[in-house]
């Protein structure tokens, strides 16, 4: 039986998650009560499985099979780019955090029955094309391989428009 998660544990995990999000250029949903409910689910899943699986998805209970939905999940950044929120709406865009936009439905990216094929799972040849474009922060040189650059550089906090396509 999983021990009960206390309010103090939820508050501390919320504060930690908020600090980590801000330090990385991300924003938590401004609805604090909603976020604390998600944090409680993450803590419960961490006790249950040994890792913080997304509380809005059905975990398979096997870490290797759930790597894509360990928070922050593999789908967070593309969801933020396309929908201004991740699937569970824990993370939101700067526009949502500032009250300029509202969160709408975010479609599920995970394939039924398990994770989608992740880029790190695919064999890569040094001579072959990369599975994602590489973006470079023109301010600090930070590189990221994904469809779109981050909203804010996690290193120097430069905005998205300061990135260029590198490869």
Image (tube, rainbow, N blue to C red):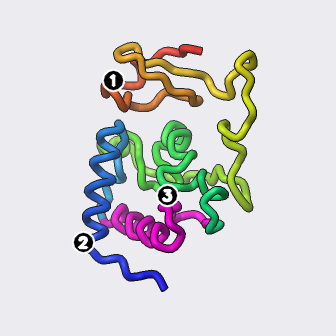
Tag 3 residue: 88
Q: Residue visible at 32% across and 59% down? A: 31
The magenta segment is 33-59
| Residue 158: image tag | 1
Q: Name the residue located 26 percent from the left edge and 56 percent from the top edge.
A: 15
Q: CA distance from mark 1 to mark 2?
A: 34 Å
- Dot 2: element: helix
Residue found at the very far bottom of the displayed protein? 1
45 above or below 65? Answer: below
Q: Is residue 92 shown in magenta?
A: no
Element assignment for label 1: loop
Q: How far apart are the two marked residues, 2 and 3, measured between alpha carbons?
A: 23 Å
User: What residue does disc 2 label?
Assistant: 8
Near-viewer residue (7 or 93):
7
- Name the N-terminal-most of marks 1 and 3: 3
Going by the image, does 149 lie left or right of 118? left
Query: What is the quadrant of the C terminus in the image?
Result: top right
Which residue is depicted at the point 41% across and 32% down? 151
């Amino acid at each position: 039986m999983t021990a009960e998660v206390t309010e103090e544990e939820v508050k501390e995990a919320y504060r930690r998650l908020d600090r980590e999000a801000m330090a990385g250029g991300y924003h938590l949903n401004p609805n604090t009560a909603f976020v604390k409910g998600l944090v409680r689910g993450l803590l419960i899943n961490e006790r249950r499985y040994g890792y913080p699986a997304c509380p809005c998805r059905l975990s398979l209970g096997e870490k290797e099979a759930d790597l894509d939905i360990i928070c922050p999940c593999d789908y967070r950044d593309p969801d933020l780019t396309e929908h201004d929120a991740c699937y569970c709406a824990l993370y939101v865009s700067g526009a949502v955090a500032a009250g300029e936009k509202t969160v709408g439905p975010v479609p599920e990216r995970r394939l039924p029955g398990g994770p989608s094929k992740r880029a790190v799972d695919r064999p890569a040849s040094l001579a072959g094309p990369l599975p994602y474009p590489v973006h470079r922060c023109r301010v600090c040189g930070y590189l990221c391989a994904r469809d779109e650059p981050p909203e804010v550089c996690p290193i120097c906090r430069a905005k998205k428009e300061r990135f260029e396509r590198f490869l």
